[in-house]
Image (spheres, rainbow, N blue to C red):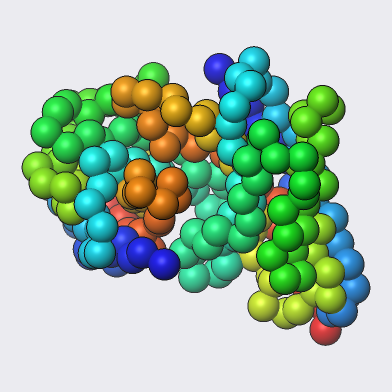
Amino acid sequence: GAVVSQHPSWVICKSGTSVKIECRSLDFQATTMFWYRQFPKQSLMLMATSNEGSKATYEQGVEKDKFLINHASLTLSTLTVTSAHPEDSSFYICSAWDRSSYEQYFGPGTRLTVT
Amino acid sequence: AQTVTQSQPEMSVQEAETVTLSCTYDTSESNYYLFWYKQPPSRQMILVIRQEAYKQQNATENRFSVNFQKAAKSFSLKISDSQLGDTAMYFCAFMKENAGGTSYGKLTFGQGTILTVHP
């Protein structure tokens, strides 16, 4: 099946700094990508829908100025956590929607720890 | 809006036995897809099985099969001959067909069920 990569897989940053997470579809073009947040033993919480060439659509309660999403190409979406705080520590997962196969492919996730 | 409910937070089964995970959903849509995803300790989401709502036949993938009851809005997953590698968190998910616009491909997940397979 298709592959979606995420980078970095694990990042530690200091409180107040920003961190960028990349999500790439390696062998297909993804006009739509999704960003999730997951706490241990809990479900995936959708943060936003990223559409190539347009602004992201954020779910209710997600601060769009804090979680900046850019989908500049058909294979790359980025999530930037700005002015990170310890409560932003979590596991972030991206997924890419392949319209040709009508399937969703998930990245391996990024563990963010804010100290 | 759609909702997906998994009422079993945790389940356990002995190796080689059969276990069924429950999922119910609520929607006013006629055309949709249902999925079961597996998330092992590595946390990589893996598609287990997919069911198109318009298909009456229950989907099967090797040891995994579903019992899709459209009228009851129920979509359970049966794992036969359980293996240690089946230990994972399992998520039921819903997706509208041809949602259009920014909802295309958007999944609604249930709360998840942690399945432990014991030797």
Picture layout, residue A81 above or below residue A111: above
Where does the image place residue B105, in percent across and percent down from the top left?
A: 42, 37
Q: Residue at coordinates 69% horizontally, 23% vertically from top-left?
A: B26
Which residue is painted at 62% across and 50% down in the image? B50
Q: Is residue B1 above or below residue A55?
A: above
Asked if one can make out residue A95 in the rendered structure from this viewpoint, the answer is: yes
Q: Quadrant of residue B70?
A: top right
Q: Is residue A59 visible?
A: no
Relative to A18, B55 lies left or right:
right
On screen, residue A53 above or below B64: above
| B7 vs B81: above or below | above
Compared across the picture, whether B19 is left or right of B91 comes to right
Q: Quadrant of residue A55?
A: top left
Residue at horizontal 49 percent and vertical 37 percent from the top: B107
What is the residue that sits farthest to the bottom in this orientation? B119
How many discs mark residues in the rendered view?
0
Q: Position of residue A108 (x, y in %)?
A: 38, 63
- Which of B77 and A27 lies nearest the eye of the viewer? A27
| Horizontal side, residue B110 vs residue B45: left or right | right
Screen quadrant of the C terminus of chain A: bottom left
Of residues A55 and B95, the one nearer the viewer is B95
Q: Position of residue A36 (x, y in %)?
A: 39, 43
Residue sitting at 66 percent across and 35 percent down?
B53
Q: Position of residue A77 (x, y in %)?
A: 19, 47
Seen from the viewer's position, the closer of residues A15 and B38 is B38
Classify the position of the N terminus of chain A by image quarter.
bottom left
